Amino acid sequence: AQRVTQPEKLLSVFKGAPVELKCNYSYSGSPELFWYVQYSRQRLQLLLRHISRESIKGFTADLNKGETSFHLKKPFAQEEDSAMYYCALRNSGAGSYQLTFGKGTKLSVIP
Amino acid sequence: DTEVTQTPKHLVMGMTNKKSLKCEQHMGHRAMYWYKQKAKKPPELMFVYSYEKLSINESVPSRFSPECPNSSLLNLHLHALQPEDSALYLCASSQDRTGSYGYTFGSGTRLTVV
């Protein structure tokens, strides 16, 4: 069975400090991982896909298959980064594809 | 149009009522999803439609009945709900059922069952 673990419920950092939101996964197949973000009073939206290897809003995430991790990083936090962040794993089994979410980490950037 | 639109935004219903939640997208996406999100919890998958056919039902009680009239619309019919069904109901869509390009979520319907 697949599982996504985000060990921190809440992460507080000062503006300008580096940010790392942790995500570990458990999956027997070839995983596809995503980060979704939910700003206050806004809809859940896709932030990053591991297969695209892109940087969005200064965030990057690298899939480490050896450590089964997909941590989200940003070198300098901004106040507008304060939000709820969900790591998600897309699994495939028996021809079906499902997106499994971690429990989320609330990032609070202190001015 | 790059959005998933859900109506209504808020709904209060009694346990004997029948109501429907609606979801619409015009991005040409061929997979659509219903998720349930309780406060401070991650979204939980309820149903998946792929090419207007139900492909996944995550053991959801029959008091929730999904319907996909066409490739742009997804409904969730509600009947005889319980107070514990109160939650944010999210609709999402993806280009296809693989979801490799990510999902686009609606803003949700906040449902309160009294």
Image (cartoon, coloured by chain):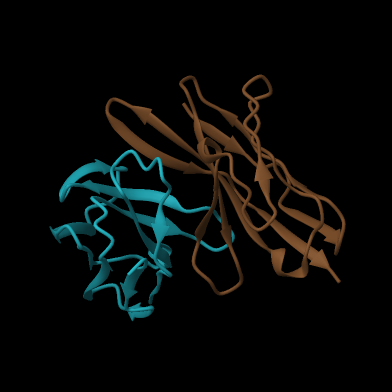
Chain colours: A brown, B cyan
Q: Residue at x 62, y 23 (%)?
A: A65
| Residue nearest the observer in this picture, B50 or A55 | A55
Q: Quadrant of residue A93?
A: top left
B50 versus A107 height, above or below: above
Name the quadrant of the C terminus of chain A.
Answer: bottom right
Residue B6 lies, in percent from the top left, at 33, 72
Q: Is residue B55 left or right of residue B87?
A: left
Q: Residue at x 52, y 40 (%)?
A: A52
Q: Residue at x 61, y 72 (%)?
A: A40
Q: Quadrant of residue B50?
A: top left
Residue B7 lies, in percent from the top left, at 31, 76
Q: Quadrant of residue B8?
A: bottom left
- Look at the image and tell me whether residue A64 can be seen: yes
Q: Residue at x 65, y 58 (%)?
A: A57
Residue B62 lies, in percent from the top left, at 22, 53
- Look at the image and tell me whether residue A82 can be seen: no
Q: How many marks?
A: 0
Residue B106 lies, in percent from the top left, at 39, 66
